[in-house]
Image: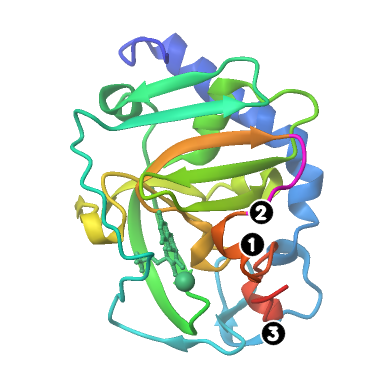
Amino acid sequence: MPDDPSDSDAEARIVEGRLKLRQRFLDKMNKSASLADPKPLGTGAPNRHGMPLIPVGQTETKKWPVLDLGRHPQVPEAQWKLVVDGAVENPLTLSWADFLALPQVEDTSDFHCVTTWSKLDIPWKGVQLSTVIALARPAAGATHLMTHGYDGYTTNLALEEALKDDVLLAHTVYGERLPVEHGGPVRVVTPQLYAWKGAKWIHRLEVLTRNQLGYWELRGYSNTAHPWRNDRYS
Ligand SMILES: Nc1nc2c(c(=O)[nH]1)N[C@H]1C(S)=C(S)[C@@H](COP(=O)(O)O)O[C@H]1N2
Ligand SMILES: [Mo]
């Protein structure tokens, strides 16, 4: 459990834990495709990370389509739980109140769906995924993360992707609570990867010591999912 949020020492420890964990993966992170690709494919002015604004094969949309397996679990905030387990020293389960007591961030980012639409400048609010992973203290051999939704959906992430600053556990969008169809109460967003890497209705973060495939990855979608390499299928 996180400490009392009114305790600023506790908050400082949480922030420090996040930075330390990020440091462990910084080298891999800086070499990852969305930060280090020498020839990113796409069009338009550089985005926040120096990549072309619209990745290759994508078209900007103003609408926000809903894409999922068709089950929209209704999880009231009072019953919502976030489990962090697997290769960690401190497995934990956060309640809604625990989650809201963690340091909150706002971040505006782009959303690239593999079905070729991109929605730009979505204003999210939530908790950095790295904050929650750091609380659980990944074991020395931890390399990947399996994210599980309440609908049974899974998707895998390398930790150097999962720990990026703009990867959020988002509970608010456009100033309102995240609607159920877009994954409320809480979803993952992965702005530097195709959007299927962000599990809606997030329920469990399972830290792994090797890569495992999630729902779409088992069905032929790419493990790495880098939009500026047209990295859609494996
Ligand atoms: N839990 C869960 N998360 C999911 C999915 C899903 O079926 N279940 N679909 C993924 C896919 S394929 C995409 S493109 C995005 C779509 O997010 P949106 O419906 O908010 O546009 O959610 C991703 N996260
Ligand atoms: Mo998708």
Kindly indicate whether the residue at mark 3 contacts the one at mark 2 (C-beta within 8 angstroms). no
Secondary structure under the numbered disc 2 in the rendered image: loop
* Badge 3: residue crowd in 10 Å (few <14, some 14–19, many ≥20): some
For badge 2, the amino acid type reads: Leu
Secondary structure under the numbered disc 1 in the rendered image: helix
Give the CA separation, mark 2 to mark 1: 6 Å
Q: Residue at x 24, y 53 (%)?
A: 178
Q: Position of residue 63 (x, y in %)?
A: 28, 80
Judge by depth and name the residue closer to the eye, 11 or 101.
Answer: 101
Give the CA separation, mark 3 to mark 1: 26 Å
Q: Which residues are magenta?
A: 209-213
For badge 3, the amino acid type reads: Leu
* Badge 1: residue crowd in 10 Å (few <14, some 14–19, many ≥20): few
Q: Position of residue 82 (x, y in %)?
A: 40, 31
Quarter of the rendering containing residue 52: bottom right
Judge by depth and name the residue closer to the eye, 228 or 47.
Answer: 228
* Image-based side of 37 in relation to 97, left or right: right
* Image-based side of 13 in relation to 109, left or right: right
Q: Label 2: which residue?
A: 213
Which colour style is shown?
Answer: rainbow
On screen, residue 118 above or below 140: below
Q: Quadrant of the C terminus?
A: bottom right
On screen, residue 188 above or below 208: below
Secondary structure under the numbered disc 3 in the rendered image: loop
